[in-house]
Image: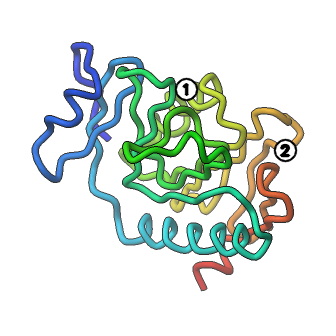
């Protein structure tokens, strides 16, 4: 992820980017996105399948939507993100455009170029926008940092070989090491 551009942008600017170029907006600052690695995409795929299977087997009403999927966090034109995985439990938020407001649960896979964005900028933005649960998966350190914004006792850091339970999706427990074997 590159540094933010200096002027104030809107979603109109996002839609005018050249084909193949992706970016996100946080309070009008544009952050260009780098291409994901193989491991990044494998983690997105495996987590999407595991979370989706859990939702389906429990007859849940939530939807799991992997990137690229537009999320308009504040329902305005100055905030636009594409989380690696979005879980939306209020289907009235889902439109043809994307998610209108904050998803309930977001997973981001860290890459070397997105560390500051995922651990700082998005952490603050997701919390203030109303996301209930945020997982930051770091393949380099093989750790997952979990934030339960409505339940602080759910927050913590886990290794890939430890089970991680979700506060948003009752009964969901994932051990990332098992997904990657």
Look at the numbered disc 2 and give the secondary structure of its residue: helix
Q: Residue 35, located in which quarter of the rendered image? A: bottom left
Please tell me which residue lies in front, 89 or 171.
89
Look at the numbered disc 1 and give the secondary structure of its residue: helix
Q: Is residue 88 left or right of residue 154?
A: left
Residue 155: percent from the left, percent from the top? 79, 42
Seen as rendered, the residue at the extreme top is 7
For the C terminus, the image quarter is: bottom right
Number of other residues with Cα within 10 Å of mark 2, as a class: few under 14, some 14 to 19, many 20 or more: some
For the N terminus, the image quarter is: top left
Residue 34: percent from the left, percent from the top? 28, 49
Residue 162: percent from the left, percent from the top? 78, 67
- Would you name the residue on which mark 1 appears? 125
Q: Residue 97, located in which quarter of the rendered image? A: top left
Give the residue drawn at x 81%, y 59%: 165
Seen as rendered, the residue at the extreme right is 153
Q: Label 2 near label 1: C-beta < 8 Å?
A: no
Please tell me which residue lies in front, 16 or 174.
16
Give the residue drawn at x 47%, y 47%: 83
Q: Could you tell me how far apart the alpha carbons at marks 1 and 2 are, in whole angstroms?
A: 19 Å
Give the residue drawn at x 66%, y 44%: 90
Marks 1 and 2, the one that precedes in the sequence: 1
Residue 147 image label: none
Q: Residue 4, located in which quarter of the rendered image? A: top left
- Would you name the residue on which mark 2 appears? 154
Seen as rendered, the residue at the extreme bottom is 181
């Amino acid at each position: 992820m590159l540094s933010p551009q200096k002027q104030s942008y809107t979603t109109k600017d996002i839609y005018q980017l050249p084909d193949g170029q992706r970016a996100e907006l946080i309070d009008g600052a544009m952050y260009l996105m780098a291409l994901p690695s193989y491991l990044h995409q494998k983690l997105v795929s495996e987590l999407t399948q595991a979370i989706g299977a859990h939702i389906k087997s429990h007859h849940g009403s939530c939807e799991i939507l992997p990137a690229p999927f537009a999320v308009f966090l504040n329902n305005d034109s100055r905030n636009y993100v594409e989380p690696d995985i979005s879980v939306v439990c209020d289907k009235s938020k889902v439109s043809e455009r994307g998610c209108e407001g904050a998803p309930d649960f977001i997973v981001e896979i860290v890459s070397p170029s997105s560390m500051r964005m995922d651990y700082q900028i998005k952490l603050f933005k997701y919390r203030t926008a109303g996301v209930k649960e945020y997982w930051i998966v770091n393949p380099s350190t093989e750790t997952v940092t979990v934030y339960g914004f409505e339940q602080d006792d759910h927050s913590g850091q886990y290794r890939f070989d430890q089970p991680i339970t979700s506060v948003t999706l009752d009964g969901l427990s994932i051990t990332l090491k098992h997904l990657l074997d």
